[in-house]
Amino acid sequence: MYDITLIPGDGIGPEVIDSAKQVIEATEIDMNWDIVNAGADVYAKKGILVPDEVFKSIERNKMVLKGPITTPIGCGFRSINVLLRKKYDLFANIRPVKKIKGIETPFKNIDLVIFRENTEGLYSGIEVKEQEDEARAIKVITKKASLRIIKEAFEYAQKNNKEKVAVVHKANIMKLADGLFLDCAREVAKSYPHIELQEVIVDNMCMQLVMNPSKYEVIVTTNLYGDILSDLCAGLVGGLGLVPGANIGRDMAIFEAVHGSAPDIAGKNIANPTAVILSGAMMLNYLGENKRSKLIVDAVERTIEEGKYVTVDLGGTASTTEMTKAIIQNLVD
Ligand code: ATP
Ligand code: MG
């Protein structure tokens, strides 16, 4: 029996979280869902953005599956997502990007994992308005945070027999901040002599990724570059509806899709549930439930390959609930 905090979130969140919950339950796992909510919806109803019960539940269970949360402007918070990552020191944002059979892309092989630093960089939250017509955002890079995310990437590469890790930076311009991140990568790489360190400047990386993404296996980078490259890579494999993610700390983890709340398609039962379902599969893997995790991944891939019950973003006509049903059917077959 696992105790899991389930946060539906905003926009398409409740729809796709419900799909993920159903698919996970179809693996006949014993789950005790602790359903709590935070975000714009909760704020509109209760005047509070993150009720205390949410923090309590996360701290009790230490394992979270969450939908996207919108942070309304003027509520006193910058971003709840960033707050949770910082508060619980979830330093590694891990986003696997893999080509799925049945989806047309210009590339045959895409199988890479992005390790995004999750606690500092340009997300430091330090912004100052010097005067009416001048504002500054401070980028914070520390050796401690850089070393641990880079080590995480190399450890992953080692465990999964990857040959290369690409560190993405802009040290030619931000010589001190990105320079420190790059130095940390060189330092960590010394302990992994059999793994090649690829040093790639972020603008060049954008071009490389859209021309020849199979050159890369593992990417490790600072917070904002990681955010941007994740969306770029999502585009390479068929869109934001497909890419899952994990925020991992020392003893706590929050699993969530790369995509946001997608207000443009919310409440219409047309969102692609795949990204959140695969985030659920990542969570099961993390819990050691590798067989069940694989069952889910296989069922999702089969459903997409068959192509009959896929959502509009993938060129189909199925609703969120129809695609979910098809995935569950493929899982139990
Ligand atoms: P945020 O600020 O929360 O990241 P955003 O404005 O970047 O939000 P997203 O919610 O990430 O927006 O969505 C970007 C685009 O991708 C939207 O047009 C949305 O419709 C589409 N999209 C995102 N997620 C999905 C999904 N699961 N299924 C289908 N389309 C999606
Ligand atoms: Mg976004």
Image: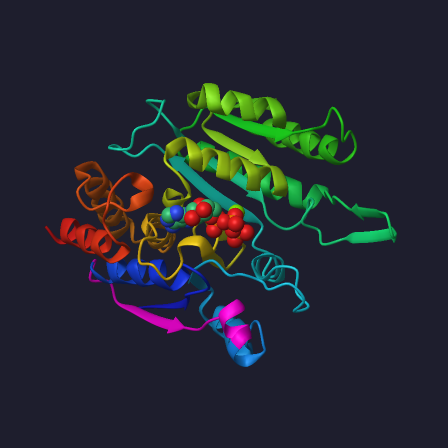
Q: Nearer the viewer, residue 325 or 115?
A: 325
Image point (35%, 24%), residue name: 109
Looking at the rendering, the stretch of residues picked out in magenta corresponds to 27-44
Q: Was residue 34 drawn as part of the magenta stretch in this picture?
A: yes
Identify the residue at the far left of this view: 333
Q: Nearer the viewer, residue 3 or 116?
A: 116
Question: What quarter of the picture does the N terminus occupy?
Answer: bottom left
Q: Residue at x 53, y 61 (%)?
A: 70
Q: In the picture shown, does residue 260 fall above or below 191?
A: below
Please state if 221 lies on the left or on the right of 24 as rendered: right
x and y percentages locating residue 53 in the rendered image:
51, 78
Left or right: residue 300 compared with residue 244: left
Q: Position of residue 163 (x, y in %)?
A: 45, 23
Q: Which is more toward the observer, 214 or 284?
A: 214
Q: Give the residue drawn at x 54%, y 47%.
A: 92
Is residue 213 in sight in this rendering?
yes
Give me the residue at 69% from left, 44% from top.
Answer: 121
Residue 30, above or below 126: below
Q: Is residue 289 magenta?
A: no
Viewer-side residue, 324 vs 251: 324
**Residue 25 position within the rendered picture, expressed as x and y whole percent measured from the top left:** 24, 63
Furthest residue to the right? 131
Q: Is residue 262 visible?
A: no
Q: Position of residue 40 (x, y in %)?
A: 53, 68
